[in-house]
């Protein structure tokens, strides 16, 4: 079950964290994986790991916020079967404390980046007579999270795009779903907390653990397993849906 043998998958932000876990698992299940990262160096560790385990993987330096770069990269890759829109950046701030430049940066990567990859991927899916898209949304699109105005706005847009794409390409055998993780423990989270809350890391981690009813943060491998299912033939009856993977955050925090 859940074989991706002979499938070609593109994973944006596939060099670290959740994206790296997805890239590694997809390769393990037989897919040829193309990782899109800002630089080839950013993807190097993931590429080395996958190759060491016998997987097929390629990396492409690409800024997902730049449509010209994205289109050129997808044309270079050719026909694909799977797209995982995982690349994204975080931001802290309320609407009145979010500078315009920060808002634009979040929109360019987290919204326009997803649009750019969808725009470039659809013609390649057609060459394969269909395919599967998984967009990385967030619990921030479901519930109000303090001090996450720009990030929540962007992830809400990703969820809406998921529905639109799923509807528009029903007759072309292209499925589109999204995943909404809660807090997931990744190197990015470690770095973000160290930079944003210096000296208070232990307190912040304790808060993050306690904020999720299950009592811990999620693991990248757990999100990857859900992405694998949604991209497999076993999920062929699923489209236009969002899947929270949140330790009970949305429905049990009361």
Image (cartoon, rainbow, N blue to C red):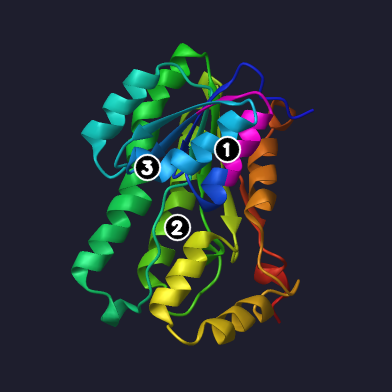
Q: Can residue 231 be seen in this view?
A: no
Q: Dot 3 lies on which element?
A: helix
Task: Tell me which residue sits at (65%, 69%) in the image.
Answer: 250
Tell me which segment is drawn in magenta.
21-33
Which image quadrant is residue 4 in?
Answer: top right
Given this view, does label 2 or label 1 mark the residue nearer the observer? 1
Residues under numbered marks 2 and 3 in contact, where contact means CB atoms less than 8 Å apart: no
Quadrant in which the N terminus is drawn: top right
Return the mark for residue 155. Answer: 2
171 lies above or below 227: above
Magenta region, main secondary structure = helix
The residue under label 3 is 41
Return the mark for residue 159. Answer: none
Whether the magenta-drawn stretch holds residue 32 is answered as yes
Quadrant in which the C terminus is drawn: bottom right
In this picture, residue 213 sits left or right of residue 56: right
In this picture, residue 150 sits left or right of residue 2: left
Which image quadrant is residue 173 in?
Answer: top right
Task: Tell me which residue sits at (71%, 32%) in the image.
Answer: 235
The residue under label 1 is 49
Whether the magenta-drawn stretch holds residue 162 is answered as no
């Amino acid at each position: 079950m859940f074989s991706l043998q002979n499938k070609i998958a593109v994973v944006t932000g596939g060099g670290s964290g959740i994206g790296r876990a997805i890239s590694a698992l997809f390769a393990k299940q037989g897919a040829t994986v193309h990782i899109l990262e800002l630089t080839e160096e950013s993807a190097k560790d993931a590429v080395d790991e996958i190759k060491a385990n016998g997987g097929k993987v390629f990396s492409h330096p690409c800024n997902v916020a730049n449509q010209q770069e994205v289109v050129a990269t997808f044309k270079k890759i050719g026909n694909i079967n799977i797209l995982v829109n995982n690349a994204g950046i975080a931001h802290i701030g309320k609407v009145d404390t979010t500078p315009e430049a920060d808002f634009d940066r979040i929109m360019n990567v987290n919204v326009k980046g997803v649009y750019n990859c969808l725009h470039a991927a659809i013609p390649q899916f057609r060459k394969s007579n269909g395919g599967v898209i998984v967009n990385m949304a967030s619990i921030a699109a479901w519930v109000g999270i303090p001090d996450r105005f720009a990030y929540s706005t962007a992830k809400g847009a990703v969820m809406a795009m998921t529905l639109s794409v799923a509807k528009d390409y029903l007759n072309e055998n292209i499925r589109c779903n999204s995943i909404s993780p809660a807090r997931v423990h990744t190197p990015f989270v470690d770095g973000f907390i160290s930079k944003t809350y210096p000296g208070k890391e232990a307190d912040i981690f304790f808060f993050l653990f306690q904020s999720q009813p299950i009592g811990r943060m999620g693991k990248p491998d757990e999100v990857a397993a859900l992405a694998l299912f949604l991209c497999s033939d076993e999920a062929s009856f699923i489209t236009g849906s969002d899947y929270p993977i949140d330790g009970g955050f949305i429905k049990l925090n009361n």
